[in-house]
Each structure stands twice: as C-alpha cells, then as structure tokens.
Amino acid sequence: MDSLAARSSGSRRDQRPLKQRLADASAPYLYSAPALILIVTVMLVPLVLGISYAFRDIQLLKPFSGGFIGLDHFKTLSQDQNFYRALRNTLWWTGWSVLLQFVFGLILALLLDKPFHGRAIVQALVFLPWAVPSFLAGLNWSWLFNPVVGPLPHWFFAIGLMSEPSNILSDPQLSMWGPIIANVWWGIPFFAITLLAALQAIPRDLYEAASIDGAGPVQRFVSITLPFLAPTIAITVLLRTVWISNFADLIIVMTNGGPADRSQIVASYIFTQAFKRLDFGYASAIALVLLVLLITYSMLIVVLRQWLLSKD
Amino acid sequence: MTAKRVLSVLAHRLAILAYVAFALFPLYWLLKVSVTPNKLLYSEGIRMWPSQTSFEHFEFVLKHSDFPVFFKNSLIVSGSTAVIVTVLASLAGYAMSRFNFRGKYWIVTLMLLTQMFPLVMLVAPIFKILSPLGLTNSLTGLVIVYTAFNVPFATFLMQSFFDGIPKDLEEAAMIDGATQFVAFRQIILPLTLPGIAATLGFVFTAAWSELLFSLMLISGNDAATFPVGLLSFVSKFSVDFGQMMAAGVLALIPACLFFLLIQRYLVQGLTAGAVKG
C-alpha cells in the first residue's frame, strides 16, 4: 500500500496521513469503476452464463427445459453437417475478405500517399463506405445484385459472365460471393486508413537517398516501404481476421445463410440457432467451439510472435 | 522522361477515379432508385438516371409508414449510448492515462479481451438475463447493452487523447490547491473537447449500425430501431424497392453527418479500436 501511494504521488518519502493516502490509492479505481462494473455485468457474466448453457438444454419455446445434459450438444454438433459446412465457409469468407480488403486497401493507401490536387476530398469520398451502417451496406449490395432493380446481373450478362441476368445470392454455388464483395467494399477504408497512417510515418529522405543511389520504384517499395509497413500489416491483418470471422451482419442481411445454408458461417449459424430456432443451448455450444478455435488462433499468433522476436 | 511522367500521373488519377467510383456507386444507386417514380422503376431498370424523378417514395415513407418512429428510436438509443459511453470512457481513460496502479494491467487485459471474443456468443445469455427484468423490447435495454459493448474501445480512444495533453497542466493546478478531480474537470476535459466529439461520433455510428442485438432483443414495432424496422419492412413488402431505398437513404443521413464530424480522428479511432472496425 505504501509503495503504491508513493508511486502515485511521486514523492520519495510519504508523509501524508493514512486517510489521504488511501484516498489517493483508490482514485484510479474510482475513475474506472463505472466502466468496469458495466463491462463485468453486461459482458463477463453473460459470457460465463453462455458457457454454462452449452451443457444445458435451454430452449425458449420449451418452458420446462433447462436441465443439465452434459455433452449432448457436442455429440449432436459432431454429426451436424451444416456446422462443418459453416466452418469451411468461415475460412472461405474470412480468407477472401481479408485478402481482398488488404490488397485493395494497400493500393489505395499508396495512391493517397502521393500528394495531388483535391486529395482531402477524394480521401473523404473513398473512406465513406466505412461510415455506412453494415445492415445498410448489406441491403444496398443485395439490391445491386437483384436483377429487378440492380444493374450488376445485367452487366455480368452483357460481358458474358452469366448466361442470363440472375441473382447470385440465390445461387448455391455463388451466394457466398455476394457478402464477400459487400464486405470488401465496406472494409477497404479500414485497411487504407491504417496503412496510410503508417506510410506517412516513413521518413521521406530515405526515398530520396535511395533514388540518388539509383533504386527504382519497385526496389524502393520492396526495400523501404514494405519493411516499414510490416508491423502494421501484421497486426491489422491478424486482428482483422478475428473480427471478420465473427462478423455475421452482412450474411444475415444478404442471404440469411441461404440458400439451404450454403453461405452460413459459424457466427451467423450461432445467431440463426438463437434467433430463429430459439435453441439457446445448442447456439451456446457452437459458440463455445468458436471461442476455443479463436483462442487457439490467438495463441498461435502469440507463439509466432515470440518465435519471430527470438529469431532476430 | 516527361512522356513517362505524364503517363504515370494519368495512371495514378485513373486509379483514384476507379476507387471513387467503386466507393460511391452503391450509394449513388440507392439514391437513384429512391427518386425513381414507381411507373419507371421496371421499364428503366438499369438506366443511370431516370427520365423523371419524384419524391413520392420519401413522402410515403415519412407520412404513411413507421419509419419516423424507427428513426426516432434509433436516435434516442444511439444518442444516449454515445453520451453515457463518453462520460464513462472519459473517467476510465483518464485513470489509464494518468495513474500507475496495480490493477491497471488487469483492466487493460479485460478490456482487450472484450474486443476479441465473438459478441454473437452473448446474444442468448443477454436475452435470458434482460427478459425477466423487462428490458427486452425496450430502448433502455438496448442502451445498456450498447454502452457496455462500446466502453472498452472508447476508453482506449479517450486515453490516447489524454496522453496527448501535458501532465504539468493539472500538476500546476494541484499545487495551487485544486484536487485532482477538479483539475480534471476544469482544465483537462475542456482541452480534450475535440477528442470527446470524436468519441461521441464513433460510438454514435457504432450504435446506429448495430444489428444482431437489436434484432434479438426487439420484437414489436414500438421499440424497433432503424435496422430492425428496415429489415422487417424488407421481408414483408419486398417489392416496394423505391420505398425501401428511400428509407435506406434516411438511415444514411445521420451516419454520414457523424462521419464528417469524426473524419479527422479516423486514424486514432481505428487504431484504438483496431479490432472493432
């Protein structure tokens, strides 16, 4: 307690009365208490409760459900073909979304890094999709894909990609691509903004020195830009992967997991179980599996980081 | 050499143009269909601009539908969430920025963890907790949930703003006899006003966009927020494209206003809540 009060007041020898020291030591906790209480009651308690649901039979429509059933949900889950498909779809959805958002975001950041006339206004316009609410982005793109009011099927037909103007969202083979395209549109600004900030932190004289030494643009990009961007790229891609794999809004709005669960990812499958079938127990069991997978992924990142650090 | 330079500038501008077109086209289309009169909707399906425009869809949506109620509900929920979160996050962010204390590491860890795990996990338990309290189907319930979800990220954001203000300022005030809280309120907070505005904007936008919990917690029309109302409208009257898109344009307005407000702080906000988007 003594050392704590001393640290917070910064004096070497504490001569304040005990009451004053106590008040000083508790100050930071008082400042953060309201936020903490809320986080614990609205996030942590439901999280623990949700984990317990995974082992119970909880269905909203069955008033007498609620008993512990052990691992029954997980047995059902291991036989559930829709779950395995959702798992594969999650990889597909996350992989393509992150890859395309990152590549187009990086290109946009490089384009915006060059000074030009009207850059501020262009920047505001290309970042605008980020401000569009995700439900609206989903609806907007599903209308664009709809042959009745949207132009996209007609354009695809005109350039020979489709044999007739049809809706890719109702095509079991292609439906996943609808939300992926909407997600790319929506997420490019995120990568562009963070990468642009990192780009602008690179000292300009490095480029000048390199071009005096005769380095071409490609060489400058590979030996200056990329190494400087690498930490930002690594952290944003890794965090974004977790976030996108949990991001179900666009899928729920655009395809609702359909047709026939072909575009369901794990997160939207959990939501469907809870929202449509009101089977909270089974939904929580799937959620627990998702949580374990995400924790494994995060651990892998930590281990990878340690390994990379120790190599240097 | 000059020809090559002209060519590279041209390529740069064309690429920029392509990005602007890609970013704006969906929104442009939304606006276009919303002002296309019904009789032209199908005959002029993929024309870039209808031969005749009208505001009939907006008129219908504003006068004969529940959208004004949804709009009001969403404003109440997002506005109160933004204000409460900003107050709580200013306090917590100040503690993170100015104090060194034992629990700090754990608080930061807890807040980071809440940003990592899938919120969809909480849909069922939160419904079960709120339902006996009478907080489902209520705007208050939504405000409580959204406030908790947004506090961690807003705390990191506010902390980054406080970190940018020199410590000497409140130390000088405290030497003059003010308590730390008075110094915080009267000297530090006014200096962070831009940061406070940015936090309000970020949280408002996040609450305005939230979908899954409002779908789960709200069922009636009275307490429906904009996303819930729009989605139920879409599944019920999926042929009235003009009206749906007019409603969509309305949902876009507050989000765009707040985007303009927080534009300058995007980088700070995105790095503080890198996991949030």
Image: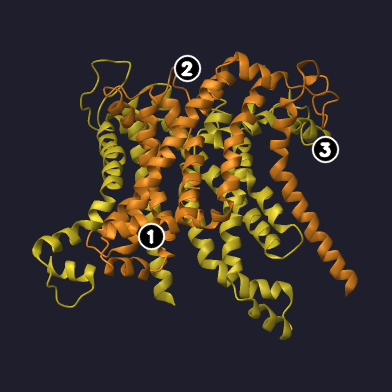
Chain colours: A yellow, B orange
Q: Residue at x 36, y 44 (%)?
A: A291
Task: Judge depth for marks 3 and 2 and give the one in front.
Answer: 2
The residue type indicated by label 3 comes to Ile
Relative vertical location of residue A104 with respect to residue B102 in this rendering, above or below:
above
Which amino acid is tagged 2?
A: Asn
Question: Which of A64/A2 is in front?
Answer: A2
Q: Is residue A203 left or right of residue B167?
A: right
- Residue at point 55%, 17% (across, down): B66
Q: Calculate the distance from the C-alpha at mark 1 to the C-alpha at mark 2.
A: 45 Å
Nearer mark to the viewer, of 3 and 1: 1
Determine whether the residue tagged by mark 1 lies in a helix, strand or loop: helix
Which badge, 1 or 2, is on the more N-terminal residue? 1
**Left or right: B114, with A116 as reference point:** left
Mark yes or no: residue A132 visible: no
Q: Amino acid at mark 1?
A: Ile
> Residue shown at 57%/70% (left/top)?
A201
Query: Is residue B247 or residue A270 the one in the foreground?
Result: B247
Asked if both marks, 1 and 2, belong to the same chain, the answer given is yes
Q: Is residue A23 above or below residue A282?
A: below
Rendering coords of residue B169 (x, y %): 37, 67
- Please give the label number shown on residue B221: 2
Quadrant of the snapshot with the N terminus of chain A: bottom left
Pointer 2 local density, CA inside 10 Å: few below 14, some 14–19, many at least 20: some
The spot of residue A131 in percent (x, y) is 58, 43
**Decide: marks 3, 2 in contact (CB < 8 A)?**
no
| Element marked by disc 3 | loop
- The chain under label 2 reads B
Q: Which residue is mark 3?
A: A159
Q: Residues within 10 Å of mark 1 (few under 14, many from 20)?
A: some
Residue indicated by mark 1: B187
Give how far across and how far down residue A238 sits, in percent: 48, 56
Q: Is residue A108 left or right of residue B112?
A: right
